[in-house]
Image: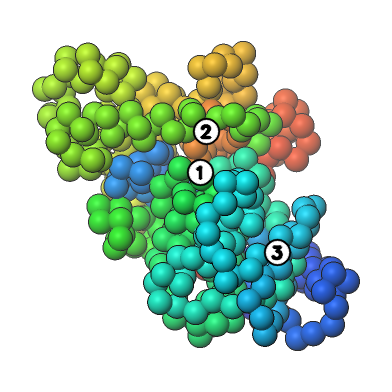
């Protein structure tokens, strides 16, 4: 498995920062675990550009790995014990001879470690013990998928230490999703893990979720004079799992009326023809969410075509359409139980005010709280940051770059 240099992973202006970051991580490893030969690993957060809440119904997405990542300093051991000390958290210790699901590990890193090992073993690959120190600059609750990055990081470590890099990027994503669904107990599609595992700007078609079709798109948005911004609106994701779960559940309730498990393969005309029955049996919101799903898949195709042909204005138009659909039809901008908390709505309004008909903005990630995404003309970037930071706090607006690789071993 190829090792990547810092220059291949990060932009040139971040090399000094990243060099110091890896050095400090190595020092922390030594302080916690002692001396020894160590190796370095990294897995990126991701940004979703199109395909909001489509993957769980076997839809299409446009996503990319980003410059924020989780890194690890790790060393293989001769026993079956995995010890992971993540910055700011207690050390997790997991014995890989016991890969049972434990209810009291729900929503913990230990559950992810155990789940990743379980799936790797089930696929016929090797597992083993290691010690690791990790640190992350992926914003939690940001829609950048810090949990997926951590899962992919674990897969990458085990892949390099015990499997000679034989686990593919697609398998690593599937392993990670399994751990999150079955052990961490969080319902999720495969998009987060796939974007983190593969890296770059990619489209993913989940028609066959066991064999998703992935296509990379070589595009540099800076050449069009735009920057990608993620704005943290400081929303709280606590107790939002029912809101997230309702989206795939409602979509699948519509699919069930057609004798199917998921919406993929059902046409818009079929949905509209059964409008009265769907509204009666599943509710108005489920009906609207089903229509969002179908239109959003078409938008992903249109976005990819626009990027490939170099029509950036057409791409931005589709991004805005995606955001509009998420707001009105998917309805994941704020939680119905807390209508007084509408940070995403505020962020989107401010973004539109500054952009004034240029660029694009939309909800980012799962929604209900967290972040918005914006493509900002570079000549408005300073004003954009000033306005959004002025409302949500200094540092709320993050300017990101697209990372060309997924989970990798790093050569320093």
Other-residue count near label 3 (Cα within 10 Å), few / some / many at <14 / 14–19 / ≥20:
some
Q: Residue at x 66, y 60 (%)?
A: 70
Residue 186, label in figure: 1
Q: Which residue is mark 3?
A: 93
> How far is the residue under mark 3 from the one under mark 1?
21 Å
What is the secondary structure assignment of the residue under circle 1?
loop
Dividing the picture into quarters, in which one does residue 371 lie?
top right
**Crowd around label 1: few <14 · some 14–19 · many ≥20 (10 Å):** some
* Residue beneath the point at 45% across and 45% down: 188
| Closer to us: 350 or 97 | 97
Q: Nearer the viewer, mark 3 or mark 1?
A: 3
Q: Are marks 1 and 2 in contact (CB under 8 Å)?
A: yes
Q: Nearer the viewer, residue 403 or 190?
A: 190
- Residue 400, x across and y down, in percent: 61, 51
Residue 222 point in image, percent of width and height: 54, 54
Res. 146 visible in picture: no
């Amino acid at each position: 498995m190829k090792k990547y240099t810092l220059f291949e992973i990060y932009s040139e202006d971040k090399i000094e920062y990243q060099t110091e970051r890896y050095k400090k991580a190595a020092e922390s490893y030594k302080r916690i675990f002692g001396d020894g030969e160590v190796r370095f690993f990294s897995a990126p957060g991701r940004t979703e550009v199109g395909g909001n809440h489509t993957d769980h119904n076997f839809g299409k997405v446009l996503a990319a790995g980003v410059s924020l990542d989780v890194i690890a300093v790790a060393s293989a051991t001769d026993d079956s014990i995995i010890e992971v000390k993540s910055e700011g958290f207690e050390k997790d210790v997991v014995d890989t001879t016991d890969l049972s699901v434990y209810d009291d590990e729900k929503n913990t890193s230990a559950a992810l470690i155990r789940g990743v090992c379980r799936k790797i073993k089930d696929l016929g690959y090797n597992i083993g013990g290691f010690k690791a120190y990790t640190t992350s600059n992926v914003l939690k609750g940001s829609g950048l998928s810090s949990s997926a990055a951590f899962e992919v990081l674990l897969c990458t470590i085990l892949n390099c230490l015990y499997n000679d890099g034989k686990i593919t990027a697609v398998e690593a994503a599937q392993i990670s999703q399994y751990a999150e669904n079955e052990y961490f107990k969080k319902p999720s599609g495969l998009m987060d893990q796939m974007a983190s595992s593969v890296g770059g700007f990619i489209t993913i078609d989940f028609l066959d979720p066991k064999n998703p079709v992935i296509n990379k798109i070589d595009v540099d948005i800076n050449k069009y004079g735009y920057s990608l911004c993620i704005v943290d609106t400081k929303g709280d994701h606590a107790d939002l799992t029912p809101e997230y779960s309702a989206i795939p559940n409602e979509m699948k309730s519509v699919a069930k009326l057609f004798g199917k498990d998921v919406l993929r393969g059902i046409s818009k005309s079929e949905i509209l023809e059964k409008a009265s029955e769907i509204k009666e049996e599943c509710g108005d919101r489920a009906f609207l969410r089903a229509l969002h799903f179908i239109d959003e898949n078409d938008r992903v195709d249109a976005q990819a075509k626009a990027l490939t042909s170099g029509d950036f204005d057409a791409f931005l138009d589709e991004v805005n359409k995606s955001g509009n659909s998420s707001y009105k039809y998917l309805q994941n901008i704020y939680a119905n139980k807390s209508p007084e908390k509408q940070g995403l709505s505020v962020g989107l309004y401010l973004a539109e005010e500054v952009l004034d008909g240029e660029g694009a903005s939309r909800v980012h990630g799962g929604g209900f709280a967290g972040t918005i995404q914006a493509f900002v003309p570079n000549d408005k970037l300073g004003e954009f940051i000033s306005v959004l930071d002025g409302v949500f706090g200094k540092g709320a607006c993050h300017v990101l770059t697209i990372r060309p690789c997924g989970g990798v071993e790093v050569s320093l």
